Image (cartoon, rainbow, N blue to C red):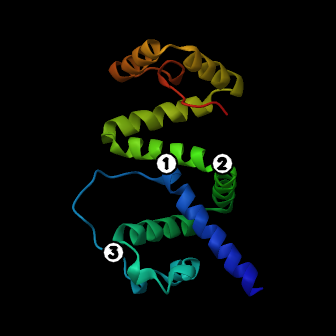
Amino acid sequence: MRTISHTLRATLLALLLVSAPAFAQVAPPSAPQAGVTWSSLSGEQRKLLSSFSGQWDHLPAQRQQALARGSERWLNMNTEQKGEARDRFQRWRTLPPERRQVLRDRWEQFRSLPPERQQAVRENFRRFRNFTPERRQQLRQQWQRATPEQRQQMLQHSRERPQPAAQSFHPRRSR
């Protein structure tokens, strides 16, 4: 029973780390932030993060903050949201390491965008997600067939004048 509990906690922790980008509302970089003390975490957070208890004080402040935020988000999720996060984590785990690195790099690119550009990307993604699978596939193919110059024009056009996602979204991969 203890092994199952430990495995479940480890899985939940990994889910928190992987699902963070999906829930993040990234603030602009600021001054270095202080770490989170183990004692400042709620009992539920400490239980969820128990595998880190012995090394918590040695983790970088940024890592402590990310784990604290992630555990708080996890604890506030409903059952359906937790299931979706588990599904995302499972998909993440099946990706080859090279693909994971590409996604990490894209996440860093996204985080480096100004807040208004991040919001525009989020809005385009939301719109794209609401299209039918057929329409999404059609848009992916259109993007893939475009020359670099055409892609650049599509991107420039989307920055100048917000358009429906069909015209402004530029997926980088097909599913």
C-alpha gap between disc 3 and disc 1: 23 Å
Taking the spot 41% from the left edge, 72% from the top edge, the residue there is 64
Q: Position of residue 1 (x, y in %)?
A: 78, 85
Q: Position of residue 118 (x, y in %)?
A: 38, 39
Query: Could you say which quadrant of the image residue 13 lies in?
Result: bottom right
Q: Amino acid at mark 2?
A: Leu
Q: Give the residue pinned by disc 1.
A: 104
Instruction: Say what secondary structure mark 3 lies in.
Output: loop
Q: Is residue 117 above or below residue 24?
A: above
Say which of marks 3 and 1 sits in front. Answer: 1
* Of the image marks 3 and 1, the number of the one nearer the N terminus: 3
Taking the spot 63% from the left edge, 56% from the top edge, the residue there is 85
> Which numbered marker is on residue 89?
none
Q: Give the residue pinned by disc 2.
A: 95
> Which numbered marker is on residue 35?
3
Taking the spot 48% from the left edge, 31% from the top edge, the residue there is 124
Q: Amino acid at mark 1?
A: Arg
